[in-house]
Image: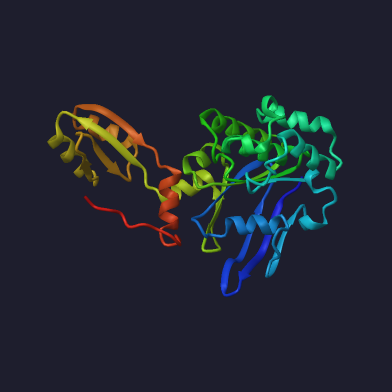
């Protein structure tokens, strides 16, 4: 099967280094989420993989070959980098037909891609009449047109309505389940957590993480337990006796950081503490991502205090 291999990749624009000695591999059979703050080098890296920019040094290959050397590349690699790329005066169907003809892809694939992306009913409308979500679907249809082994998508959920977001999740999981290589760049942490198996995280052009999603989260966010009780004094005493500190919140619930529900349940039961609620507060990808990239953000706003 075909993988994406980035090896010691560097790209400089004058004195600015957008990608800095980057090395990672995207294997088939899983969805790899590609994360990083604005200016981290994600889009530049994807452009380098697709031969749209030349690296200053290093390599980016697909199945061991540079994209520019692929014959009829849409049959091997499908990509969405810019949903506005389609010419506004063409119909959605004609846009796909032109792409298909340039890569000797049969016309039947045009209609199949339109059906798959939910655009069959608007296929003969001009692209300039499409909403952002419809253009996004057209870009995804173009990426899928050649039935490629490798798919690269930059912010594929952008502009999609809730039904479309559910659809793109299922699509990404299906593509990976079919053994394809899937790389998806996104700023939406909740969405990424819903479809990604593995993460590659960049900061200021450098690799910050290359790890399975769950490992990434658990390595950076301590578990927390949420508790409600009618006897705050007994709860605090029982927890303190076992080295736990609890924080009370305005709505009356307590949180214990670095603890698990089984342990807290046992010790409060043994101490006779009345419990109204006991639940794990799940660590999120957003928390872990912000922890890792806190010093890597090129543009940030100051939090306003009330």
Residue at image position (42%, 62%) is 295
Residue 23 % position (x, y): 63, 61
Residue 26 shows up from this direction:
yes
Where residue 171 sits, quadrant-wise, is top right
Determine whether, in the image, residue 207 is placed left or right of residue 272: right
Residue 213 % position (x, y): 52, 45
Look at the picture and state if 231 lies above or below 12: above
Residue furthest front as drawn: 89
Where residue 137 sits, quadrant-wise, is top right
Residue 262 shows up from this direction:
no
Residue at image position (57%, 75%) is 15
Residue 43 % position (x, y): 60, 55
Look at the picture and state if 255 lies above or below 43: above
The one nearer the camera, 304 or 49, is 304
| Quadrant for the N terminus in the image | top right
The one nearer the camera, 54 or 175, is 54
Determine whether, in the image, residue 99 is placed left or right of residue 35: right
């Amino acid at each position: 099967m075909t993988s994406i291999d980035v090896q010691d990749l560097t790209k400089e624009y004058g004195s600015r280094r957008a990608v800095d000695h980057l090395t990672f591999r995207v294997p088939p059979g899983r969805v790899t989420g590609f994360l990083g703050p604005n200016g981290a080098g994600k889009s530049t890296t994807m452009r380098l993989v697709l031969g749209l920019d030349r690296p200053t040094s290093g390599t980016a290959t697909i199945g061991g070959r540079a994209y520019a050397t692929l014959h009829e590349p849409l049959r091997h690699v499908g990509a969405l980098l810019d949903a506005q790329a389609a010419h506004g005066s063409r119909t959605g169907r004609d846009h796909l037909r032109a792409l298909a003809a340039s890569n000797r892809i049969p016309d039947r694939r045009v209609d199949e891609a339109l059906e798959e992306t939910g655009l069959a009913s608007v296929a003969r409308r001009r692209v300039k009449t499409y909403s952002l979500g419809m253009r996004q679907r057209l870009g995804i249809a173009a990426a899928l047109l050649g039935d490629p082994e490798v798919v690269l998508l930059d912010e594929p959920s952008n502009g999609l309505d809730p039904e479309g977001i559910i659809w793109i999740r299922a699509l990404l999981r299906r593509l990976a389940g079919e053994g394809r290589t899937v790389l998806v760049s996104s700023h939406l942490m909740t969405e990424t957590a819903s479809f990604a198996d593995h993460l590659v995280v960049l900061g200021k052009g450098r690799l910050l993480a290359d790890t399975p999603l769950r490992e990434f989260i658990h390595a950076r966010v301590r578990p927390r337990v949420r508790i409600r009780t009618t006897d705050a004094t007994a709860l605090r005493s029982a927890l303190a006796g076992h080295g736990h500190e609890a924080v009370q919140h305005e709505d009356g619930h307590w949180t214990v950081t670095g603890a698990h529900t089984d342990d807290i349940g046992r010790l409060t039961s043994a101490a006779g503490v009345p419990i109204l609620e006991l639940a794990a507060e799940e660590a999120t990808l957003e928390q872990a991502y912000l922890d890792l990239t806190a010093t890597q953000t090129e543009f940030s706003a100051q939090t306003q205090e009330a």
